[in-house]
Amino acid sequence: MSSLAAFSTPFANSDGRTTAFVSGGADAYANARQVLSRFDLGVARNRRVLLKPNAGRTVPAGLGITTEPQVVAAAIDAFVEAGADVSVGDSPIVGVKELQALESTGIADVARARNCRVLYMDKRRYVEVPLPEGRAIHSLRVCPDVFEHDLVVSIPVMKTHMHTRVSLAVKNMKGCLWRRSKVDLHMLPAVPGYGDKSLDVAIADMSAVLRPHLSLIDGTVGMQGLGPSAGTQKPLGAVVASADAFAADAVACALMGIAAEEVPHLRLGAEWGYGIIDLERIDVTPEDWQQRASPFERAPTSLAIEFAGVDVRDDKSCSACQSTLLLYLRRFGEKLVADFGNGSPVVVAIGKGHAEVPRGTICIGNCLLEHRARGVFVPGCPPVGSAIERTIDAARAGVPSPAYAEEIETDDEEDEEAV
């Protein structure tokens, strides 16, 4: 994988044109093979290729949360037929084990059926990568597998996102960041001189060194509304491919009814020269590709989790905690209110910005660690829904919250050396 100064992709057109390809229909595998056939994959012969899907959560396929396995299967077959040495890997969100995520999504199954290596990218210590021109961040902790492959292919699922507008090929590379360092991008202070959220600036910074050589965007079943995991399914039946991740994202955005210029990390990255998002400068095949467009419901620009009888106090939380809490309330909210309401709303807090919380607050996530003595504390970054329910069940039974500080997972940085 190359840094920005040396970045090039063998899949780009020799004449300098920026191209993208769209295919559609009921067969996800066929759609992916069709767009991949437009590239000379022979340049990957005898080279190591890392396929990086979105397998960040422990969910089954087909929900629009993770990449469709048949799109990954098509990419494996196409690159193996071209003579490449292919691996599939990801680093999921904090609180999710790589093995569980890749297995539950069906991606591990299609890889093993093809004798393709499945990489759990968080296993080994990170590579520290400097970002000398970074605006929001000045270094990244990257999973070492990324740099041990000659070519990286980003294979995201097409989603709206409650914090970044969309989650596509550029943002999918955030899954190459090691373990909890992904969370760090959500916790940054405002960036002087920029009106955009620090997270957006950081993702654009990230794309300076984590740009894929080829992007294959799965729009078989996407997610709309409260993506990345709490939205609703959006069947589109399309696949997009380009050697320019920004161009692939711009075309996918158009299919979703969103202008790429409205997406801060895409706009900033394009302004800094990392890719093209102007559709007038992208040759898209077929000419009638926009007929496949079907507007996605957008994520709200400000999220207020509302549930009858619950007072959610959210101050600077990340999307992982928000999604976890929303899904928990959908499933267990009525029970929570019945057990803890006592005639007044149950106070639940998430986020790192709380100077104080009321006594009796249910504090969700490690960001609330300092307030654990104020009520019920649920550790995790983010805690999974089952952990929330177990902790609250214990509180219902009158079991006091223990001192969780020593039980929260750490990266054990002192016990390992950086690669």
Image (cartoon, rainbow, N blue to C red):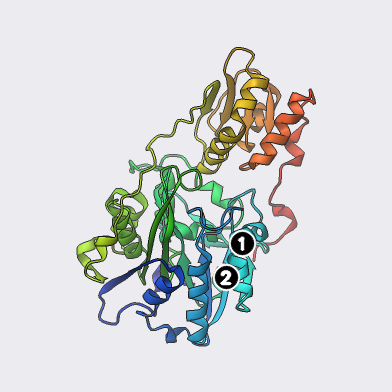
Figure quadrant of residue 20: bottom left
Q: Amino acid at mark 1?
A: Leu
Q: Quadrant of the C terminus?
A: bottom right
Q: Is residue 86 left or right of residue 21?
A: right
Q: Which residue is mark 2?
A: 88
Q: Nearer the viewer, mark 1 or mark 2?
A: 1
Mark 2 or mark 1, which is nearer the start of the sequence?
A: 2
3D distance between C-alphas at marks 1 and 2? 9 Å
Q: Amino acid at mark 2?
A: Val
Query: What residue sits 69% from the left and 26% below the top?
Result: 376
Q: The residue tagged with tag 1: helix, strand or loop? A: helix
Q: Give x and y (percent) for residue 341.
A: 62, 17
Q: Residues within 10 Å of mark 2 (few under 14, many from 20)?
A: many
Q: Is residue 66 left or right of residue 258?
A: right
**Residue closer to the observer: 44 or 284:** 284
Q: The residue tagged with tag 2: helix, strand or loop? A: strand
The tally of labels here is 2
Figure quadrant of residue 141: bottom right
Q: Give x and y (percent) for residue 365.
A: 62, 36
Q: Is residue 43 visible?
A: yes
Q: Is residue 58 above or below residue 308?
A: below
**Discs 1, 2 touching: Cβ within 8 Å:** yes
Q: Is residue 135 visible?
A: no
Q: Which residue is mark 1?
A: 102
Marker disc for residue 335: none
Query: What residue sits 55% from the left and 47% below the top?
Result: 183
Query: What residue sits 64% from the left and 62% below the top?
Result: 103
Q: Give x and y (percent) for residue 402.
A: 78, 30
